[in-house]
Image: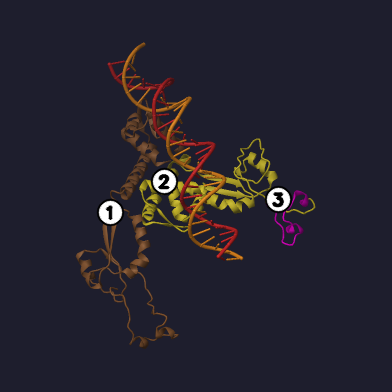
Chain colours: A yellow, B brown, C red, D orange
DNA sequence: GATCTTTAATCGCGTCTAACGATTTATTTC
DNA sequence: GAAATAAATCGTTAGACGCGATTAAAGATC
């Protein structure tokens, strides 16, 4: 039995879904399954009833939940008492394009706040051009961006994810009738593209 | 931070020796070193002062010790509560009318068994008259029954569900032709009613 | 009632970790 | 100064862990 497993268990019990829990925990659904399975095997009992595709805590699961919560809270307590040099505090200024912000940031912010309650998060939108200078001058600490070309010399760059681009048109647009759209079809078209990404 | 590491830390703090702790934990001394090091790096502080070849808890180490002990004890508590030894065991004798048994009990029994695999379930049918005495004498632990009047003095009674009664007849029965049946229609009829409920 | 979606379980694979044994370094003891 | 003791470090290896792909089953949708 490890803390990691108990945290996973608590998350699943909270959202009552392996898949949602895996998203919240930033790992694959199969890993969540494996961890729960390991716990169930170690304790030799079922923690969840898998009823159809719904997941419900068993009586034993409910009892374990109380313990697991306490353990989880205690680790948080430890971390907040000891970690990052007596409390990380201050402010972190982050640049995020709105397209990313609306989709990904809510859960990130939530989690960051529980981990570092004393840190004030500043999220700002700004144009791509100012980005490099802003990072260099320290006006912002961190940036997320949607981009193709990544080469900044003074800045650490880590690719996090790849996103597909999709073509969207009104239903009456000529291209909407075609089963397939080629690059050549786009040359004459007016395209609306995100400005700051 | 994992439970394994905290247990190692507690052991080292108890015996104030990496080597002795490694023996007690049945692992190599180097592994103990590695775990303590991992903890120290994660929390970014020293847990022990290595004074010569003696080992002493730092102030931070003493504070962590209190937490780690609680965590360790909690895992023991979990294991002893869920371990088959102290787990609910024995037998539970339940009286269930067949009408209820056939409809509701399969899923109840299944779930009960997964939650309490060590408990033997005895389901028995018997007549209503014996019921009160059987409960009082402890021959049965629990009873489900379909009834209208609930007043037992020595027994806890909890209404679980209400069930509609429906009139059933063969297709050729005279009443089966009528769009609606009144109470008066029943006076002359032979009714088949469940005996023990 | 057939098809599409959603969701958890399972499998195979790659990687990272953690434990080990051997060795090194440092301190105490004689 | 030599021997003994104890913690740190290093290189290796087995196992754990996470991932992606696939499968199976239950709901949802048409």
Magenta span: predominant SS is: loop
| Residue C28 falls left or right of residue A147 | left
Point 21% across, 67% down: residue: B136
- Judging from the image, mark 1 belongs to the subunit labelled B
Mark 2, residues whose alpha carbon is within 10 Å: few (<14), some, or many (≥20)?
Answer: some
> Within the magenta stretch, is there residue A177?
yes
- Asked which secondary structure carries label 2, the reply is helix
Residue C4 place in picture, x, y as percent = 60, 58
Q: How many marks?
A: 3
Residue A56 place in picture, x, y as percent = 43, 57
Q: Are tags 2 and 1 found on a single chain? A: no
- Asked which secondary structure carries label 3, the reply is loop
Work out whether D3 lies above or below B139: above
Viewer-proximal residue among A59 and A160: A59
Residue C1 place in picture, x, y as percent = 55, 65
- Asked which secondary structure carries label 1, the reply is loop
Viewer-proximal residue among A96 and B106: B106
Point 73% across, 52% down: residue: A181
> Which image quadrant for residue A55?
bottom left
């Amino acid at each position: 039995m490890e803390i990691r497993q108990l945290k996973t268990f608590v998350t699943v019990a909270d959202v009552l879904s392996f898949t949602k829990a895996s998203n919240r925990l930033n790992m694959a659904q199969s890993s969540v399954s494996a961890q729960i399975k390991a716990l169930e095997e170690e304790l030799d009992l079922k923690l969840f009833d898998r009823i159809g595709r719904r997941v419900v805590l068993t009586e034993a699961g409910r009892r374990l939940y109380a313990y697991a919560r306490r353990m989880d809270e205690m680790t948080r307590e430890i971390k907040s008492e000891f970690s990052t040099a007596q409390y990380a505090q201050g402010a972190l200024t982050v640049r995020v394009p709105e397209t990313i912000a609306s989709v990904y940031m809510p859960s990130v912010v939530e989690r960051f706040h529980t981990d570092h309650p004393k840190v004030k998060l500043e999220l700002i939108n700004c144009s791509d051009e100012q980005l490099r200078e802003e990072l260099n001058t320290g006006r912002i600490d961190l940036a997320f961006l949607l981009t193709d070309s990544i080469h900044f010399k003074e800045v650490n760059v880590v690719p996090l994810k790849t996103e597909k681009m999709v073509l969207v048109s009104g239903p009456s647009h000529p291209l909407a009738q075609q089963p397939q759209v080629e690059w050549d079809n786009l040359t004459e078209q007016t395209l609306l593209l995100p400005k700051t990404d």
